[in-house]
Amino acid sequence: MKEVSETASKNFLSSIVGDGAHFSGNLEMSGLLRLDGDFDGIIKNNDRILIGKNGRVQGTAYSDTIIIGGVFKGELYASEKVVILSSGIVFGHIYSSRIVIEEGAFWDGKSIVSLQEKEIKKESILRGSFKLDWNKVGSVQPLYTGGF
């Protein structure tokens, strides 16, 4: 029997919260987690989290890599990187060693970017409070739409 390479296993989709699904609670898992529905709670993952274009997540997420194409409100902790795609909207704080933000993405929050995981501590960022009307998320527009 062939062994599955580490790269192939990282691309394996372990779990999904589908479009139209609503889930609340704490989730701990390995492998790729794809969220296309609504999730409220804490996610602990030792691989990757992908929030699809229709995904809406409120809470705290811990993972190696977090990719956001939908809406996220809360705190993100990534040991490798956080990627906010052009369709992504983030309201919250990011703690990671790298942040990638595509043109057209929206982010409102603070960050600590450090190559030393031990330096990524949430006590280092002032706390803010967020009030988000999920029904109005689709109407959020970037503040700057001009060219360079």
Image (cartoon, rainbow, N blue to C red):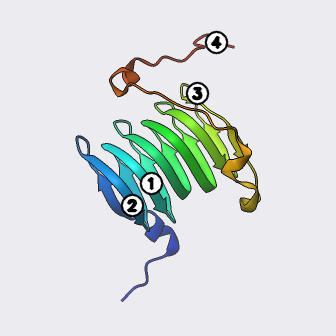
Disc number lying in front (3 or 2): 2
Q: Are marks 2 and 1 in contact (CB under 8 Å)?
A: yes
- Residue hosting label 2: 27
Quarter placement of the N terminus: bottom left
Q: Are marks 4 and 1 in contact (CB under 8 Å)?
A: no
Question: Where is 44 relative to 34, above or below?
Answer: below
**Residue 85: image location, x then y, percent:** 51, 36
- Residue hosting label 4: 147
Is 46 in front, or is 105? 46
In the displayed structure image, the side of residue 24 where residue 122 appears, left or right: right
In the displayed structure image, the side of residue 97 where residue 10 appears, left or right: left
Question: Where is 43 relative to 109, above or below?
Answer: below
For the residue marked with disc 2, what is the amino acid? Answer: Leu
For the residue marked with disc 3, what is the amino acid? Answer: Glu
Is 82 in front, or is 132? 132
**Residue 11: image location, x then y, percent:** 44, 62
Mark yes or no: residue 36 visible: no
Q: On residue 42, which mark appears?
A: 1
- Residue hosting label 3: 103
Total marks in image = 4
